[in-house]
């Protein structure tokens, strides 16, 4: 049984096109270069949930990777006050140790 052209597009062409487009980085790099020339900081927006241990580790790792760079990390979490204090403490320790 032969696949219809629509099925071929949906199963083969569309996923390959999405992957190819995700590898196009020049627009973002050009924007980042222009932003740096203007003296503006970069911005990373991260949405995560603390009920998932992987996302908790990811936000801490990302904060570490961004320390020392001219980038603002904007975090939006579904959390509690205790979680916010833990993240703020981690960020404060990393900022003081990187300077």
Image (cartoon, rainbow, N blue to C red):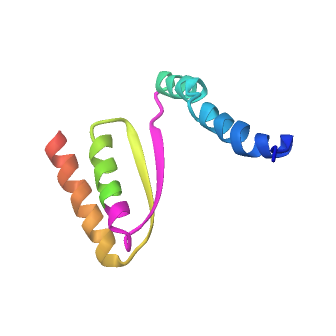
Looking at the image, which residue sits at the far front? 1
Provide the residue span drawn in magenta: 39-56
Residue 94 within the segment the image draws in magenta: no
In this view, 34 is above or below 46: above
**Image x and y of residue 89, in percent:** 22, 62
**Image x and y of residue 38, in percent:** 51, 25
Q: Is residue 98 found left or right of 80 in the rendered image?
A: left
40 or 93: which is nearer to us?
93
Residue at coordinates 30% horizontally, 42% vertically from top-left?
65
**Image x and y of residue 70, in percent:** 37, 36
In this view, 60 is above or below 9: below
Residue 44 within the segment the image draws in magenta: yes
91 or 7: which is nearer to us?
7
Residue at coordinates 26% horizontally, 46% vertically from top-left?
64
Q: Is residue 13 found left or right of 96 in the rendered image?
A: right
Q: Quadrant of residue 2?
A: top right
Q: Is residue 79 found left or right of 68 in the rendered image?
A: right
Q: Quadrant of residue 20?
A: top right
Residue at coordinates 38% horizontally, 61% vertically from top-left?
55
């Amino acid at each position: 049984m032969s696949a219809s052209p629509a099925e071929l597009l949906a199963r083969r062409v569309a996923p390959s096109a999405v992957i190819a487009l995700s590898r196009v980085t020049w627009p973002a790099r050009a924007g980042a270069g222009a932003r740096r020339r203007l003296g503006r900081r970069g911005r990373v927006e991260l949405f995560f949930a603390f009920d998932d241990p992987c996302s908790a580790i990811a936000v801490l790792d990302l904060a570490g990777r961004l320390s020392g760079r001219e980038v603002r990390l904007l975090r939006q979490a579904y959390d509690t006050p205790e979680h916010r204090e833990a993240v703020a403490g981690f960020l404060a320790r990393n900022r003081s140790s990187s300077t």
